[in-house]
């Protein structure tokens, strides 16, 4: 992936990278240099992004009670 540096020295972090790292508006990141001289990007808070499964947890809503489900199954509703 490549991006262009602006006149102010800014770059846009590609969406795939932001999603992978859990980076959003207001997130702080650091640029670090490895022993071989390459530079890499890390989250400054050292938090790991939620797994794709954790992101889905709790999104089903309140749901129906057992009585309501049984009524729908029987055609009583």
Image (spheres, helix red, strand yellow):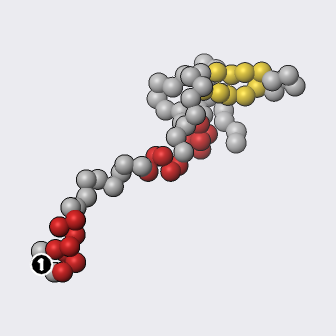
Residue named by callout 1: 76
Residue 43 falls in which quadrant of the image? top right
Q: Residue placed at 22% from the left, 78% from the top?
A: 73
Quadrant assignment for the N terminus: top right
x and y, in percent, of residue 13 in the image: 60, 34
Question: How far from the left and from the top, in percent, is residue 2?
Answer: 70, 39
Q: Nearer the viewer, residue 50 or 30?
A: 50
Measuring from the top left, give residue 46's x and y in whole percent: 60, 25
Mark 1 Cα shell of 10 Å, populated few (<14), some (14-19), many (≥20): few
Q: Is residue 27 above or below residue 48?
A: above
Residue beneath the point at 29% across and 53% down: 61
- Front position in the image: 6 or 24: 24
Q: Is residue 18 above or below residue 42?
A: below
Locate residue 10 relative to residue 59 in the image: left or right.
right
Residue 7, visible in the rendered structure: no
34 to the left or right of 58: right
């Amino acid at each position: 992936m490549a991006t262009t540096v602006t006149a102010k020295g800014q770059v846009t972090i590609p969406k795939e990278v932001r999603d992978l790292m859990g980076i959003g508006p207001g997130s702080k990141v650091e640029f670090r240099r490895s022993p071989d001289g390459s530079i890499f990007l890390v989250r400054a808070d050292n938090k790991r992004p939620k797994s794709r499964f954790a992101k889905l947890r709790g999104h089903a809503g309140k749901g129906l009670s057992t009585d309501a489900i049984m009524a729908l199954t029987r055609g009583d509703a």
